[in-house]
Image (cartoon, coloured by chain):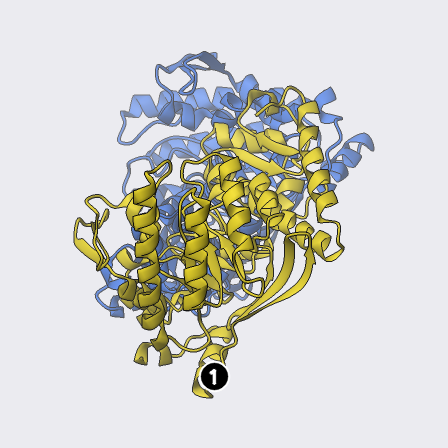
Chain colours: A blue, B yellow
Amino acid sequence: MDILERGSECGPCREMEFYRLTEMPSPFSFRLIAADGAARAGEMTTAHGIVHTPAFMPVGTQATVKGVHHDDVRASGAEILLGNTYHLMLRPSAERIAALGGLHAFMRWPHPILTDSGGFQVMSLAPLRKITEQGVTFRSHIDGAMVELTPERAVDVQILLGSDIAMQLDECVKLPAERSEIERAMKLSLRWAERCKRAFERAPSDRALFGIVQGGDDRKMRDESARELVAIGFPGYAIGGLAVGETQSVMLEIVAATAAALPPERPRYLMGVGTPADLLEAIGRGVDMFDCVLPTRNGRHGLAFTRFGPINIKNAHHADDPRSLDAESRCPAARDFSRAYLHHLFRSGEALGGTLLSVINLFYYQDLLAGARAAIAAGRFADYWAETMEQWKVKRDFRGDND
Amino acid sequence: MDILERGSECGPCREMEFYRLTEMPSPFSFRLIAADGAARAGEMTTAHGIVHTPAFMPVGTQATVKGVHHDDVRASGAEILLGNTYHLMLRPSAERIAALGGLHAFMRWPHPILTDSGGFQVMSLAPLRKITEQGVTFRSHIDGAMVELTPERAVDVQILLGSDIAMQLDECVKLPAERSEIERAMKLSLRWAERCKRAFERAPSDRALFGIVQGGDDRKMRDESARELVAIGFPGYAIGGLAVGETQSVMLEIVAATAAALPPERPRYLMGVGTPADLLEAIGRGVDMFDCVLPTRNGRHGLAFTRFGPINIKNAHHADDPRSLDAESRCPAARDFSRAYLHHLFRSGEALGGTLLSVINLFYYQDLLAGARAAIAAGRFADYWAETMEQWKVKRDFRGDND
């Protein structure tokens, strides 16, 4: 794999190459530090650094977290980023990124990176997709070319990108769905899991491949999927196919059942979830990792997550408000700029508004999870959860703010 | 003026209030440090800090430099920002900004600010404008309301904003234009200069109002305008009505003649100019201050200014180029990110691309002028100018880059 030998300028990448050249054992590992009920605090070690769990991964779809400089993503406390295989394989292409030293070097993010398999976004973004036993064929939304994504190709692409954590290719069905359809996709995902694991044997030993539990909103099928995946054996497991149309209570029931069916010594990743409330609920049910576009997407649309609940900064009553969003925030933008100024930026269509709110939200998510980790370690997660939700209600005392 | 007594949280604003309360003499001053031929290096002192000249002022149209965080604007070396009266008076309004502590506090830029009078943008942006002796009436491009901007109102707005340097209202005509039309606008601008100066007597004593020389491309009229303005008496003079359709050589001839007609002990500000080459040409003719949207506007469109000339990062041949734009730049973005990555951001429509190139260009402009200041102080401005232009040609050796 000569692309893996190319020198990168970033320290951790050089370090990773050192591991490879000296045939050191895989540095990927996970250890539990504390448990509090079902909630867990842990530490995941990758070639590019340590990730403290529960962890929130900002989404860097096209090798950038939309509108936010990497320095701010890092300053928010993010220890790991998510990259989207679907986007990156189409543009600028996995081969190009590999030739430029891999995704870490390409985007200058020397910290851990997880990539999805591309499957979910093929289903949601690509026109003319067709799923067979072999894989999924789709038309690129960029240039119209027909592209095939097999389990083997999904793994190859992620090896080329240099992801610390790669995901198996799976098929995710929208809910509600027929039981037969859920079962078909779940079983196909299991067969693809095996093929992905085999394909991943070619990956450098410091990388990890996670399996993905499917099974829709059916607990029995979730159990079967989890059991079979564990039999195949992965260093970590994701819960996929949720937040795709079901109610929050159904989602949380499935999360609880699936987490309980997974081995405690492996990290558990709930894909594509969610709101701050979702995160606390899922942590309370034993989830260790999350990714979601909400903090940046909502930020770009004027919604700020704060300790006092969400605030829609575009509402007219902020126009004269000299207060910051949160004078005690760790985030400079939440502390320094007035609501009036942030409101003005949105009203004027200035990009800085979306950038500042995205940064504010990334800080909020990281602080929420740092608080959860500390609470779990102190055996008071339930209290932390209740206090956090209580404080979100403060917003209602703001001048008419019911965003 | 009770709005001026409102406390602001920023140190320099508090300081400014202290000056006011203790009736200290005006802190606005300008002193020449060095001259080298017609080129000058100087120091302008304002209530919010010192500005070294020749100075480049980034344009913060709507209380933000488009797409760039203030911290990056400051890090680039900018000592003074320009704010646009036209935009700010329409949204969020001068009264609102005053109530929020003035423009420095509103946007959290505790350093010097110059505002234009709004006149130029009324001419270029507002529909249905009508100019009379009294002032200019126009329809707001935001809500369609009819708005009147008189010399007195232009000054009032700038007092409300809290600008360290305010500009007189003037009328700028597009070139080419009839001699009679140029003369009419020049003479009207002189009468408005007098009215502005009178209106500005109400301003706190630590602020400055600059007069603006008009007269189109007619040297005689420029001389008359300069002579009459100097007779009225201002702490600084701008050269307006250029870069509005004339050739560069005509512009530079008028700049040289007008600068020579202005008192050497006052700062000279060439409005709305220009490219890096324009700046060096104008500095060589005795100009001290500049503002222009080029570094940020071009940055958003993919054009980077570098020591080796302009580079259009969207060109296909950058897609695989691992080199940074300038490995020795003081700007982290110019040093750290590869051309391939910057190219990818533009190709993918990611906002971070425009932000990074805007920052790179702001650093470039500031470094260009810092180099000019040092060269003037060392008596080698002509060499610096020649060397800089020589280096711009390096770009031609890049792989086919003829952007």
Instruction: Report the side of A335 relative to B285 (left or right).
Output: left
Q: Quadrant of residue A248?
A: top left
Question: Where residue B303 appears, x then y in whole percent?
Answer: 53, 33
Q: Decide if residue B390 is in sight here.
A: yes
* Count of all numbered marks drawn on residues in the image: 1
Pointer 1 local density, CA inside 10 Å: few below 14, some 14–19, many at least 20: few
In the structure shown, which secondary structural element does the residue marked by tag 1 occupy? Answer: helix
Does the image show residue A50? no
Taking the image as shown, residue A32 lies to the left or right of residue B183, namely right
Q: Position of residue B137 (x, y in %)?
A: 20, 53
Residue lying furthest front in this view?
B220
Q: Residue at x 35, y 62 (%)?
A: B193
The type of residue carrying mark 1 is Phe
Vertically, is A236 above or below A403?
Answer: above
Above or below A91: residue B350: below
Q: Residue furthest left?
A: B145
Identified at 35% across, 53% down, the residue is: A345
> Where's the C terminus of chain A, which quadrant?
bottom left
User: Is A120 placed left or right of B275 in the picture?
Assistant: left
Quadrant position of the N terminus of chain A in the picture: top right
Could you tell me residue A264's position as x and y percent?
A: 55, 45
Q: Using the image, determine if residue A178 lies above or below residue A38.
A: above
Where A14 sits versus B232, above or below? above
| Residue B125 rendering spot, x and y as whole percentages | 29, 44
Give the residue at mark 1: B18
Query: Which quadrant of the structure image shows residue B154?
Result: bottom left
In the image, what residue occupies the spot 65% across and 35% down?
Answer: B325
